[in-house]
Image (spheres, rainbow, N blue to C red):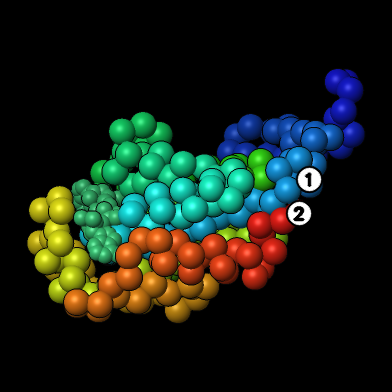
Amino acid sequence: MYAGIDKLVTSTIGKSTNILWHDCPIGQFEQQKLLNQKGCVVWITGLSGSGKSTLACALSRELHSRGHLTYILLILDGDNLRHGLNRDLCFEAKDRAENIRRVGEVAKLFADAGLICIASLISPYRSERSACRKLLHNSAFFEVFFNVSLEVCEARDPKGLYKLARAGKIKAPSDCEIVIQCKAGDCATPKPMADQVVSYLEANEFLRD
Ligand SMILES: Nc1ncnc2c1ncn2[C@@H]1O[C@H](COP(=O)(O)OS(=O)(=O)O)[C@@H](OP(=O)(O)O)[C@H]1O
Ligand SMILES: Nc1ncnc2c1ncn2[C@@H]1O[C@H](COP(=O)(O)OP(=O)(O)O)[C@@H](O)[C@H]1O
């Protein structure tokens, strides 16, 4: 047996038996001490064009300027992910579900490594967002809902995809920690929106060990 592995848990997955779980001596606790922050997932949900990617970038810039390690969100952004990790997936309901499940698992890995992981996905279904939330056992999953009207998103329509959103009747999330409100003619700039999330992380002691 290798040094440092003090617990072996076996399980059966499909037809495979003896799938081993290895516990390692350097875990989330040790990583967080090193980074002086707590690993967590900030999950940004909202319609296409609501401002998710803009907030993700503003938030990572703001946290970086304060000395915090984030995972650069552009990799965990719906469009970008479909160039790599999820290039086998399209936009049917089952593919969206798998897309979100994989992103949730990857986000959990980054949070386990002590990083503040910002995921930016439309993630329209509550059940899938809840499943990702449940992966984080220590309440380190924060949902940010962009409450931006269809009218505003459609007026922006930077990718010309808006006819698709028009068909969807997406219910507002009921279990999010943070709501970014934006009505026609009254939208905050990205910096105060990022500050709203930073204040939440600060108040919940995620910006110190
Ligand atoms: N057909 C179709 N339907 C929906 N979205 C489309 C489609 N084709 C491309 N895109 C772009 O992909 C982004 C959505 O990916 P997500 O991973 O966020 O979607 S989901 O969470 O799986 O529902 C989304 O990015 P944002 O506009 O930034 O939200 C779209 O621009
Ligand atoms: N707070 C804001 N106020 C005004 N325009 C914004 C704001 N946030 C984003 N935008 C603009 O809205 C469009 C969509 O933003 P984006 O972040 O790409 O949305 P999403 O990632 O949700 O599709 C972009 O053209 C962006 O410049």
Residue 145 position in % (x across, y down) = 40, 69
**For residue 23, side relative to residue 151 (left or right):** right
Ligand 2 sits in quadrant: bottom left
Is residue 31 visible in the rendered image? The answer is: yes
Residue kind at label 2, given as amino acid type: Asp
Report the residue at 57% width, 69% height from top.
200
Q: Quadrant of the C terminus?
A: bottom right
- Residue 209, labelled with which disc? 2
Residues under labels 1 and 2: Cα distance? Answer: 6 Å
Residue 35 position in % (x across, y down) = 71, 43
Residue kind at label 1, given as amino acid type: Lys
Judging depth in this view, the residue of 172 and 181 nearest the camera is 181
Q: Dots 1 and 2: beta carbons under 8 Å?
A: yes
Residue with the most extreme top position = 2
Q: Which image quadrant is residue 140 in?
A: bottom right
Report the residue at 19% width, 66% height from top.
153
Please tell me how crowded label 1 is: few (under 14), some (14-19), or many (20+) other residues with Cα within 10 Å: few
Please tell me how crowded label 2 is: few (under 14), some (14-19), or many (20+) other residues with Cα within 10 Å: some
Residue 115 position in % (x across, y down) = 61, 45
Judging depth in this view, the residue of 84 and 187 nearest the camera is 187
Residue 162 position in % (x across, y down) = 13, 60
Judging depth in this view, the residue of 204 and 111 nearest the camera is 204
Is residue 112 visible in the rendered image? The answer is: no
- Residue 138, labelled with which disc? none
* 43 is higher (above) or lower (below) than 34: below
Q: Which residue is labeled 1 in the image? A: 33
Q: Quadrant of the N terminus?
A: top right
* 67 is higher (above) or lower (below) than 46: above
Q: Which image quadrant is residue 208 in?
A: bottom right
